[in-house]
Image (spheres, grey):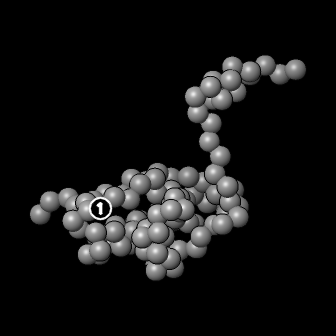
Amino acid sequence: EKPVGFALFFHNFSTWLGRAGIYLEDLFVLPEYRGKGYGKLLLKRLARLALQRGCGRLEWACLDWNTPSRKFYDSLGAVRMEEWTTYRLTGDALLSLASNISLK
Protein backbone atom coordinates (compact mmCIF):
# COMPACT_ATOMS: atom_id res chain seq x y z
CA GLU A 1 0.00 0.00 0.00
CA LYS A 2 1.21 3.45 -0.91
CA PRO A 3 -0.42 6.89 -1.08
CA VAL A 4 -1.90 7.59 -4.50
CA GLY A 5 -3.35 11.02 -3.77
CA PHE A 6 -4.30 13.59 -1.16
CA ALA A 7 -6.91 16.16 -0.18
CA LEU A 8 -5.52 19.38 1.29
CA PHE A 9 -8.23 21.26 3.20
CA PHE A 10 -8.89 23.72 6.02
CA HIS A 11 -11.85 25.01 8.00
CA ASN A 12 -13.60 28.20 7.00
CA PHE A 13 -16.73 29.86 8.37
CA SER A 14 -19.99 30.71 6.63
CA THR A 15 -21.71 33.83 7.93
CA TRP A 16 -24.74 32.77 5.86
CA LEU A 17 -25.04 29.47 7.71
CA GLY A 18 -23.50 30.57 11.00
CA ARG A 19 -21.42 27.38 10.92
CA ALA A 20 -17.98 26.18 10.05
CA GLY A 21 -17.30 24.55 6.72
CA ILE A 22 -14.47 22.76 4.99
CA TYR A 23 -12.66 24.31 2.05
CA LEU A 24 -10.86 21.86 -0.20
CA GLU A 25 -7.73 23.65 -1.38
CA ASP A 26 -6.36 20.83 -3.50
CA LEU A 27 -7.40 17.34 -4.54
CA PHE A 28 -4.68 15.35 -6.25
CA VAL A 29 -4.52 11.78 -7.50
CA LEU A 30 -1.46 10.43 -9.31
CA PRO A 31 -2.17 10.34 -13.06
CA GLU A 32 -1.89 6.56 -13.32
CA TYR A 33 -4.59 6.15 -10.63
CA ARG A 34 -7.12 8.65 -12.00
CA GLY A 35 -10.48 7.27 -13.09
CA LYS A 36 -10.24 4.37 -10.62
CA GLY A 37 -12.35 5.87 -7.81
CA TYR A 38 -9.61 7.30 -5.58
CA GLY A 39 -10.68 10.92 -6.01
CA LYS A 40 -14.26 10.00 -5.17
CA LEU A 41 -13.04 8.08 -2.13
CA LEU A 42 -11.08 11.11 -0.91
CA LEU A 43 -14.10 13.38 -1.34
CA LYS A 44 -16.39 10.86 0.39
CA ARG A 45 -14.01 10.79 3.34
CA LEU A 46 -13.87 14.57 3.43
CA ALA A 47 -17.69 14.80 3.27
CA ARG A 48 -17.93 12.38 6.17
CA LEU A 49 -15.39 14.43 8.12
CA ALA A 50 -17.38 17.60 7.45
CA LEU A 51 -20.51 15.98 8.87
CA GLN A 52 -18.66 14.57 11.88
CA ARG A 53 -17.33 18.06 12.64
CA GLY A 54 -20.76 19.68 12.30
CA CYS A 55 -19.82 21.62 9.17
CA GLY A 56 -22.52 23.16 7.01
CA ARG A 57 -20.73 22.76 3.69
CA LEU A 58 -17.82 21.40 1.74
CA GLU A 59 -16.62 23.65 -1.05
CA TRP A 60 -13.77 24.15 -3.49
CA ALA A 61 -12.83 25.97 -6.67
CA CYS A 62 -12.16 24.49 -10.09
CA LEU A 63 -10.67 26.19 -13.12
CA ASP A 64 -13.12 26.78 -15.98
CA TRP A 65 -10.94 24.96 -18.51
CA ASN A 66 -10.58 21.82 -16.36
CA THR A 67 -13.38 19.91 -18.09
CA PRO A 68 -12.54 16.43 -16.72
CA SER A 69 -12.61 17.71 -13.12
CA ARG A 70 -15.80 19.70 -13.68
CA LYS A 71 -17.53 16.62 -15.10
CA PHE A 72 -16.31 14.59 -12.13
CA TYR A 73 -17.61 17.16 -9.60
CA ASP A 74 -20.93 17.42 -11.46
CA SER A 75 -21.28 13.63 -11.25
CA LEU A 76 -21.05 13.88 -7.46
CA GLY A 77 -23.97 16.29 -7.29
CA ALA A 78 -21.79 19.33 -6.56
CA VAL A 79 -23.35 22.66 -7.55
CA ARG A 80 -21.37 25.17 -9.62
CA MET A 81 -21.44 28.62 -8.05
CA GLU A 82 -21.55 30.50 -11.36
CA GLU A 83 -22.62 33.79 -9.77
CA TRP A 84 -19.46 34.09 -7.65
CA THR A 85 -16.26 35.78 -8.81
CA THR A 86 -12.91 35.08 -7.17
CA TYR A 87 -10.74 38.08 -6.32
CA ARG A 88 -7.04 38.03 -5.53
CA LEU A 89 -4.40 40.51 -4.45
CA THR A 90 -0.75 39.70 -5.14
CA GLY A 91 2.52 41.48 -5.78
CA ASP A 92 2.40 45.28 -6.06
CA ALA A 93 -1.37 45.46 -5.52
CA LEU A 94 -1.04 43.56 -2.23
CA LEU A 95 1.90 45.73 -1.13
CA SER A 96 0.07 48.89 -2.07
CA LEU A 97 -3.07 48.00 -0.14
CA ALA A 98 -1.09 46.87 2.91
CA SER A 99 0.92 50.10 3.01
CA ASN A 100 -2.14 52.38 3.16
CA ILE A 101 -3.55 51.48 6.57
CA SER A 102 -4.15 54.91 8.11
CA LEU A 103 -7.69 56.13 8.76
CA LYS A 104 -8.46 59.54 7.30
Height in image: 34 above or below 7?
below
Residue farthest to the right, as pictured: 104
Looking at the image, residue 45 lies above or below residue 99: below
**Residue closer to the observer: 95 or 48:** 95
Query: Does any portion of residue 48 appear in the rendered image?
Result: no
Picture quarter with the C terminus: top right
Residue at the spot 38% in from the left edge and 59% down from the top edge: 27
Residue type highlighted by circle 1 = Val
Q: Is residue 89 left or right of residue 58?
A: right
Q: Position of residue 63 (x, y in %)?
A: 51, 59
Q: Is residue 78 left or right of residue 69?
A: right
Q: Residue furthest left?
A: 1
Using residue 55 as the reference point, say whether residue 97 is left or right of it. Answer: right
Q: Residue 90's spot in the image, x, y percent? A: 58, 33
Q: Position of residue 7 (x, y in %)?
A: 36, 58
The picture quadrant where one finds residue 30 is bottom left
Residue in the image at 68% along x and 60% along y: 84
Q: Secondary structure at mark 1?
A: strand
Q: Residue furthest front?
A: 65
The residue singled out by tag 1 in the image is: 29
